[in-house]
Amino acid sequence: MEMAAPLLVFVLLSLATSLTFASDPSSLQDFCVADNTSTVFVNGNVCKDPMLAQAGDFFFSGLDVPGNTSNKQGSRVTPVNVLQIPGLNTLGISMARIDFAPYGLNPPHTHPRGTEIIVVQEGTLLVGFVTSNLANGENRFISKVLYKGDVFVFPIGLIHFQFNVGQTDAVAFAALSSQNPGVITIANAVFGSNLPISDDVLTKAFQLEKNVVDYLQAQFGPKN
């Protein structure tokens, strides 16, 4: 019986270790610069010969330049992910600059592969996210007004937004826990998909009249 406790501890520690390594593995090399010209499809990007890596593979310039916010939403996201910096491949991190005109909106969207953390550099932003479906059928809305220097986190996969509630331009910088976090803008995806989602589906899902659905599809369709 004296051996039972140490043996149980060993088994539990072994199980915990095996569960830890069941997630995505850490990089097995210093870096894996993405070969964006490769025609091979893998979960991520194919690595190019590390002996061909150069400083430019790990560099991006331009986040000091304001994005053009002259669009319907009044916002512009400048991403810096593996497509801009090939050296981010396998490193699990990326960032973005988000510019807002007065009352500009970065509309409700999700990042299916990354948690986002933002810091406000200038302006005043109303930010928020909605939880996944709770047991009681509700979805909690968690929101806060941010000022210069404030930081806020949007958990992975949850619908969130940022809205400039000030009368001047606003700027925020975001970091994301994926080399390629992806983005799904809710209205565009639902009402602007190609091919369009059936009117029967959308009228029932959103409890809207067909003419309203048709109008929204015309606003968000592929040609807009």
Image: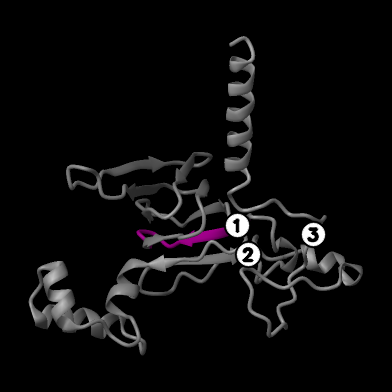
Amino acid type, residue under disc 3 in the picture: Phe
At mark 1, the secondary structure is strand
Picture coordinates of residue 67 (x, y %)? Answer: 54, 68
Amino acid type, residue under disc 2 in the picture: Asn
Using the image, determine if residue 212 lies above or below residue 156. Answer: below
Question: What residue is shown with label 1?
Answer: 95
Amino acid type, residue under disc 1 in the picture: Met
Using the image, determine if residue 187 lies above or below residue 25. Answer: below
The magenta-colored residue range is 94-106
- In this rendering, would 99 be left or right of 139? right
Q: In the image, which is nearer the foreground, mark 3 or mark 2?
A: 3
- Give whichever of 146, 88 is nearer the camera: 88
Question: What residue is shown with label 3?
Answer: 31
Q: Are marks 2 and 1 in contact (CB under 8 Å)?
A: yes
Picture coordinates of residue 154 (x, y %)? Answer: 44, 48
Quarter containing the C terminus: bottom left
| Quadrant housing residue 209 | bottom left
* Type of secondary structure dominating the magenta stretch: strand
Q: Residues within 10 Å of mark 1 (few under 14, many from 20)?
A: many
Label of residue 81 in the image: 2
- Give whichever of 49, 212 is nearer the camera: 49
- In this rendering, would 32 be left or right of 151? right
Label whose residue precedes the other's in the sequence (1 or 3): 3
Residue 73 appears in view: yes
Quarter containing the N terminus: top right
Label whose residue precedes the other's in the sequence (3 or 2): 3
Residue 105 appears in view: no
Picture coordinates of residue 167 (x, y %)? Answer: 37, 54
Q: Total label count?
A: 3
Q: CA distance from mark 2 to mark 1?
A: 6 Å
Q: Residues within 10 Å of mark 3 (few under 14, many from 20)?
A: some
- Give whichever of 82, 6 is nearer the camera: 6
